[in-house]
Image: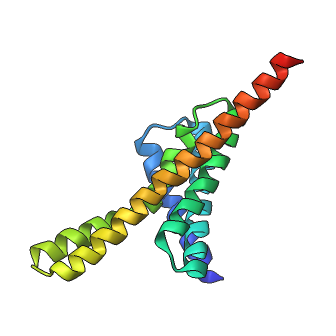
Amino acid sequence: MYYYITQFLIATFAAMGFAIYFNCPKKAIFISCIYGGISWIIYKFTLLQTNNFFIAGCFSTFVLGFIGEFAARRMKKPATVFILPALTPMVPGAGMYYTMYYLINDNTKLAQQSAIETFLIASSLAVGIVASTSIINAYKIFIDDIKKGS
């Protein structure tokens, strides 16, 4: 339990740093930071259950995309204000570092393994965000068509 609380706090503060760096509106900083912590906990929990980086990344960013879009509508701000800072704790910066480190030290087997893992995590983040945004946009079009038809 303490592990998840610690992970949540670290991810929340990491998201806060990026929210401030990206000049997010003051009212949106707190929410995007909480979303960063939530998405990181979802990522860690899903990774623990599935032992699959791609599934964990897709699922956590899919949820992040949905709650980011919800907050965007609720607070009348762009969704990127909430999604971008919250996404940064999941970006595989350490994986990129270790890939380069192994390449420099001429350990191609570990470099290849690290590069594949990093690519899977990065691509899963993109897939999750695109999927959630696409579903929400399709839902908006569907609702608009229903309203026009009535």
> Image point 43% across, 49% down: which residue?
18
- Specify the quadrant that holds the C terminus: top right
Residue 5 image position (x, y, % from top left): 62, 74
Q: Nearer the viewer, residue 134 or 81?
A: 134
Residue 145 in the figure: left or right of residue 75: right
Q: How is the image coloured?
A: rainbow
Residue 114, quarter of picture:
bottom left
> Image point 34% across, 66% down: which residue?
118
Residue 21, quarter of picture:
top left
> Image point 56% across, 56% down: which residue?
61
Residue 77 image position (x, y, % from top left): 61, 31
Q: Is residue 122 above or below residue 107?
A: above
Q: Nearer the viewer, residue 133 or 9?
A: 133
> Image point 62% across, 38% down: which residue?
27
Q: Is residue 37 above or below residue 47?
A: above
Residue 132 image position (x, y, % from top left): 61, 47
Residue 124 in the figure: left or right of residue 105: right
Residue 45 in the figure: left or right of residue 53: right
- Specify the quadrant that holds the N terminus: bottom right
